Amino acid sequence: MIMEAHLAGERNLPGLGLEAFFNIGSNGWKDAYDLNWLTASVMCQLAPISRTDALPGTPSQGDIYIVKDDDPTHANDVAVYDDAQWKYLSALKGMIAIVKDENVAVWYNGTIWTSIASGIDTPYDVGGSYNGVPAADVVLLRYPFVREVSFPADMLLSRAVAGTGATASTVFSLKKNGTQFGTMTFAAAGTVATFASASTTTFVAGDILTVVAPTVPDATLSDLGFALAGRRVI
């Protein structure tokens, strides 16, 4: 945080870096004290107007912006128009802001402000179970999506188990709107499945995920439970 010149005895506090603990009777503490209040007012529940627009030529009192990342002087600073002038506050790594013109949450990673969706993973898992031995081509799960969700190539982190192992290798189809995009395979005598998918597959609202048993069912594989690990797309 950009603060005024230090006075006798004061120190910076953790977090926002406010200044406090001035010596009793110190002269000139008012500027730092005023800046403390401005910083707390702006940075607590930070809600800038924009992070992509240039600072307006005729701003209003209280306007707050995140300075564009290509600005040669104050890139990524938080600019607030106060008392007829722009004042700049340095962002701290980990700060979160709600940008009004984008209606999106962003965070400062120490170098740039980035949307939380691209900076922090948001898991979205889809699970199901089936009791007994699945019949030929039976649908174990039919799941309609209400939001956009992406499943990674190879279905990384997905899991499936069986109460009784398979007699022979048994492959279940993972389908998007009826078209296979991946597989869930139990090896002979296995009770834990492996997954395969050629590429990342994304479902949008209205798409349907199905898990379908093989046309030739296994005689012993039974009592299945599975969880497909995806990520919500914001």
Image (tube, rainbow, N blue to C red):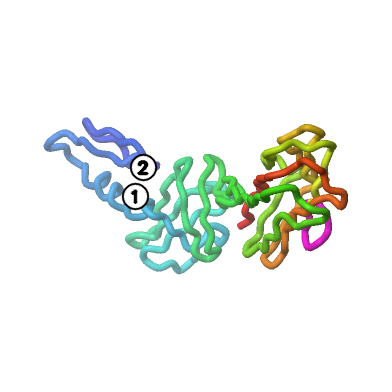
Write down the region rendered in magenta: 174-181
Disc sitting over residue 39 in the figure: 1
**Residue at image location 22% in from the left, 32% down from the top:** 8
Label 1 CA crowd tier, 10 Å (few <14, some 14–19, many 20+):
many
**Residue 221 vs residue 201, the one in the foreground:** 221
Give the residue at x 68% y 45%.
Answer: 223
Look at label 1 and name its amino acid. Answer: Thr
Label the magenta part by its dominant secondary structure. strand
- The image's mark for residue 16 is 2
Disc on the earlier residue, 2 or 1: 2
Viewed as shown, does residue 68 lie left or right of 30? right
Magenta span has 184? no
Relative to 53, say whether 224 is above or below. above
Q: Are marks 2 and 1 in contact (CB under 8 Å)?
A: yes
Q: Quadrant of residue 198?
A: top right
Amino acid type at circle 2 is Leu
- Residue 229 rendering spot, x and y as whole percentages: 66, 46
Q: In this view, does 200 lie to the left or right of 145?
A: right
Q: Where is residue 151 in the image (x, y as percent from the top left)?
A: 71, 49
Figure quadrant of the N terminus: top left
Q: Which of 101 and 186 is in front in this view?
A: 186
Res. 179 image quadrant: bottom right
Q: Which residue is drawn at 49% across and 64% down?
A: 100
Q: How far apart are marks 2 and 1 (CA)?
A: 8 Å
Q: Would you call the spot at circle 2 few (<14 residues within 10 Å), some (14-19), or many (20 or more)?
A: some
Is residue 177 shown in magenta? yes
Q: In which quarter of the image is the C terminus?
A: bottom right
